Image (cartoon, rainbow, N blue to C red):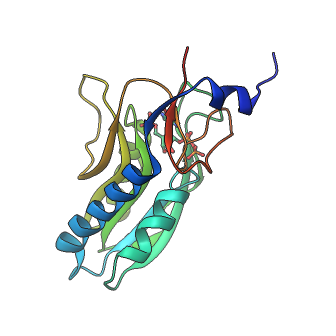
């Protein structure tokens, strides 16, 4: 059956309002400023999910930083992850740097584990992770986030950069699919 994005949204549950997302990003900006203001970090967004989070967070970080992006995909517009496929890998600009990775969601953790490992392998001095959301799975993950905006339940979530079958990254709030 064809996927209808309007129907998916109409039958979804609201998990975090746009105001709650904004407040979480304000708090993350303060926490990140405290830790990174004198580190001249390289901030790397994991595209495409990090686009909304990055766009809202970066203007709130008022210290010198450089920006780049990587692209690693595991879900391919589906709701179940597979192996990590690289589209844009980290480059030599990570060498010797404090790197902050930004992503929309830490779910099973395989994507950020692979990206962190690659940055360290290339010679990053330190790799920190900030995510807009972390999914509560109730078991250990292969990587931990250093900064978490909001937790989300163990359901497929979308909005604020997160897609559902490719749709709805543009929503300002966060929703969960109903079965
Ligand atoms: O913790 P994990 O279980 O590894 O999942 C998290 C990753 O999955 C999503 O990316 P996706 O593969 O959907 O690509 P996208 O960024 O293009 O949406 C999301 O943006 C994270 O990068
Ligand atoms: O629950 C999710 N929603 C959107 N993208 C994702 N990538 C991993 N998990 C999710």
Q: Quadrant of residue 128?
A: bottom left
Q: Is residue 3 left or right of residue 138?
A: right
Q: Which residue is pictured at 41% across the width and 67% down the height?
A: 57
Residue 19 x %, y % = 41, 53
How far across and down, in percent of the image, does residue 158 sit?
54, 37
Image location of residue 142, percent across then percent down: 29, 35
Residue 58 position by quadrant: bottom left
**Quadrant of the image containing the C terminus:** top right
In the image: residue 38, left or right of residue 88: left
**Viewer-closest of 113 and 101:** 101
Measured as percent of width and height from the top left, residue 137 is found at 31, 24
The residue lying at 38 percent from left, 24 percent from top is 154
Q: Residue at x 42, y 51 (%)?
A: 115
Residue 120, image quadrant: bottom left
From this view, report whether residue 92 is shown above or below residue 115.
below
The answer to whether residue 118 of the structure is visible from this angle is no
Instruction: Name the residue at 73% across, 32% down.
Output: 6
Q: Quadrant of the N terminus?
A: top right
**Image check: 67 left or right of 39?**
right
């Amino acid at each position: 059956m064809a996927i209808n994005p309007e129907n998916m949204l109409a039958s979804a549950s609201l998990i975090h309002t746009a105001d709650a997302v904004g407040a979480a990003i304000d708090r993350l900006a303060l926490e990140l400023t405290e830790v990174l203001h004198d580190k001249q970090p390289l901030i790397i967004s994991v595209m495409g999910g990090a686009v909304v989070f990055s766009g809202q967070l970066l203007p709130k970080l008022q210290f010198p930083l450089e920006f780049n992006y990587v692209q690693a995909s595991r879900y391919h517009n589906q709701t179940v992850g597979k192996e990590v496929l690289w589209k844009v890998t980290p480059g030599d600009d990570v060498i010797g740097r404090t790197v902050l990775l930004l992503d929309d969601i830490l779910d099973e953790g395989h994507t950020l584990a692979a990206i962190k490992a690659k940055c360290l392998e290339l010679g990053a001095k330190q790799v920190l992770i900030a995510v807009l959301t972390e999914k509560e799975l109730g078991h250990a993950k292969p990587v931990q986030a250093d900064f978490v905006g909001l937790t989300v339940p163990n359901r497929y979530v979308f909005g604020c950069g997160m897609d559902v079958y490719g749709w709805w990254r543009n929503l300002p709030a966060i929703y969960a699919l109903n079965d």
